[in-house]
Amino acid sequence: MNRNLLFGILGGVLLYLIFKGNGVVEMVNSKISEMARAIQSFEGWSERSISQLNNNPGNLKFAGQPGAVSKDGQGHAIFDSYASGWLALLNQIRIAVDGTSRIYNPDMSFYDFFSKYAEKNSSDYANYVAGRLGVSPQATLRETLLV
């Protein structure tokens, strides 16, 4: 198993255990949390939305994340709780920013990030999230989230 993948999984498990045990679902880096909230909002978090039904605020695809119990017909992870789905989203953003992701890297612009993250509407997604963070969608993850 890839060492970075292993560390990412272990880090996610540790965060899950710490935050679930305390009932707190936040990360130290508020910019990452702010981006996660913007993603959740763009996904249309509401009653009967796919993301809410799956406890998956980021509509993440199933990748064996901690707390993921299954996947739906479109391949989105189904989490055992909102806390698990939230932590998976935070972890997804964290590994993009810290360079341990196999798909994302910190020098990607929001346009680049969402062209891989989203199935469709990636430009709208990038514009929305960057706007919520008060930056240009051409800004990089590094310059926006590592402050």
Image: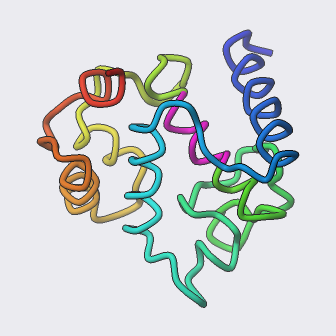
Is the N terminus in the top left, top right, bottom left or bottom right quadrant? Answer: top right
Q: Quadrant of the C terminus?
A: top left
**Residue 2, quarter of the rendered image:** top right
Q: Is residue 29 left or right of residue 122?
A: right
The image shows residue 14 at horizontal and vertical percentages of 81, 29
Which residue is depicted at the point 48% across and 45% down?
33
Quick one: 61 or 34, which is closer to the camera? 34
Residue at position x 58%, y 37% in the image: 27
Name the side, left or right, on which 43 lies relative to 28: left
Residue visible at 47% across and 28% down in the picture: 96
140 magenta-colored: no
- Look at the image and say whether residue 92 sits in the magenta stretch: yes
In the rendered structure, which segment of residues is drawn in magenta?
87-94
Near-viewer residue (94 or 26): 26
In which quadrant of the rendered view does residue 5 lie?
Answer: top right
Based on the displayed image, in which of its 4 quarters is residue 54 positioned? bottom right
Residue 56 percent coordinates (x, y):
64, 63
